[in-house]
Amino acid sequence: MLAGGLLAATVLLVLFRPGGVGEAWWAVSGGLLAVALGLIGPGEALEALGGAREAFMLLAGMMLLGGVAERAGFFGWVAALAARAGGGRTWLLFVMVFLAGSAVTAGLSLDATAAVLTPIVCAMVARLGLRALPFAFACVYAANTASLFLPISNLTNLLAYDALDLGFVRFAGVMFLPGLLAVAVNATVLVVMFRSDLAGGYGAYRFEPGNPAFFRLSAATLAAVLAALPAAPVLGVPAGPVALAGGLGVAAVAVARGWLGIREAARCVPWGLLALVCGLFVVVRAAADAGLDRLLLEGLLSAPGGEWGFGRLLAVAASAALGANLLNNLPLLTLSLGVAREAGEPAAYALLIGTNVGPNLTLTGSLATLIWLGLVRERGVEVGAGRFLAVGLAVTPPVLLAATAGLWASLRLLSG
């Protein structure tokens, strides 16, 4: 099947970037090729992209806000808070870093944790004379696992939230317990695995933002946007424009005050990521039109259990986790949106557990993991595919079970 072959080729090129060509170029090329080959019409491609406009606004707004906050020193302050809370005990510092990464992921996105917090944490532990490998793993697992909490925490969440009309408050309510259990189990397993590296203590670590006024502005804007996002849908205001307004507002003030240049502010917007998503969206839509999503639909609806009990939820989550590692979680989720719409709300949340937690298994499961891998290798932390898989095999199954159990309990509590 031509559409399926194009999808597979596009995903492989995005993941492995032959010739050093950026992933966005491969994704956009795949989308244009799908149109050129007649696999999808230009109007249908534009319709598919237009249907995800709120997700794109949320993504652009939160990433712009995160980029401005990074330049204001917000993430360095978060790392310093974790070091202070660790109280000189290395194992407790590890837990605090994991929790800090989880908070950044939940409130901004997993990309902020993978791309911004990871280098800061690596620099912090180097200054403290600690082994970097456990803390690097804490960052990437906090990025993937804690992305369960809110629609803004992961692009997969945003796409499902927008396409399936899940509702911000409803999403947060249903996924709170799964996210909480997943984070707790993940942190516990990692502490046990790296216990020999986490023995002993460390000295003082201090951080002061270079521009206190800039820091206060970015922190206050971030807090205001996070408070406004759940309230906006209740007031009949889409969440996407709220996030975008917050990001544009803080960037405009920073530029006007001379704290950021216009070009530097523009670099805070993830243009490459937006282009990548647009390209993949078109390729996946072409594959869905060719019937690939029907193949997924049969397996999803025939999962054991009849009603949406724990077994059926786990079957969907485990299948999605496997698919995320074979295909990568973003195209897998995009291809499954039609499936989830027909299967119902429980299937959508189980699907997100699989696509968010599942990438903890392999290096190619999520783009955030690949970003993280490049950053830690630049800093001398070597993580091979075998080592990541070994840790992933210990972490992923119990975290997947815990998150699914939390989802089952949440659905029962909130439906009763």
Image (cartoon, helix red, strand yellow):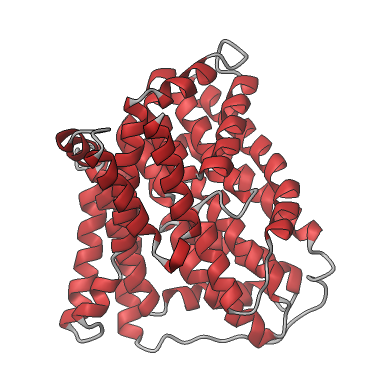
268 versus 213 height, above or below: above
Is 374 or 70 nearer to us in this picture? 374
Return the x and y of residue 52 as percentages of the image width and height: 26, 41
Locate residue 345 relative to residue 389 in the image: left or right.
Answer: left
Q: Which residue is depicted at the point 47% across and 87% down? A: 208
Q: Is residue 246 visible?
A: yes
Q: Which residue is depicted at the point 77% across and 79% down? A: 201
Q: Which residue is depicted at the point 35% across and 70% down? A: 67
Q: Is residue 166 visible?
A: no
Q: Which residue is depicted at the point 20% across and 87% down? A: 258
Locate residue 267 relative to residue 112 in the image: left or right.
Answer: left
Return the x and y of residue 277 as percentages of the image width and height: 33, 49
122 versus 99 height, above or below: below
Quarter occupied by the N terminus:
top left
Q: Residue furthest right?
A: 196
Count the marks: how many? Answer: 0
Return the x and y of residue 96 as percentages of the image width and height: 63, 66
Locate residue 409 relative to residue 349 in the image: left or right.
Answer: right
Is 122 or 8 nearer to us in this picture? 8
222 versus 285 height, above or below: below
Q: Residue furthest top?
A: 306
Return the x and y of residue 227 as percentages of the image width and height: 33, 53
Is 39 or 27 nearer to us in this picture? 39
| Res 338 quadrant in image | top left
| Res 266 quadrant in image | bottom left
Locate residue 225 relative to residue 203 in the image: left or right.
Answer: left
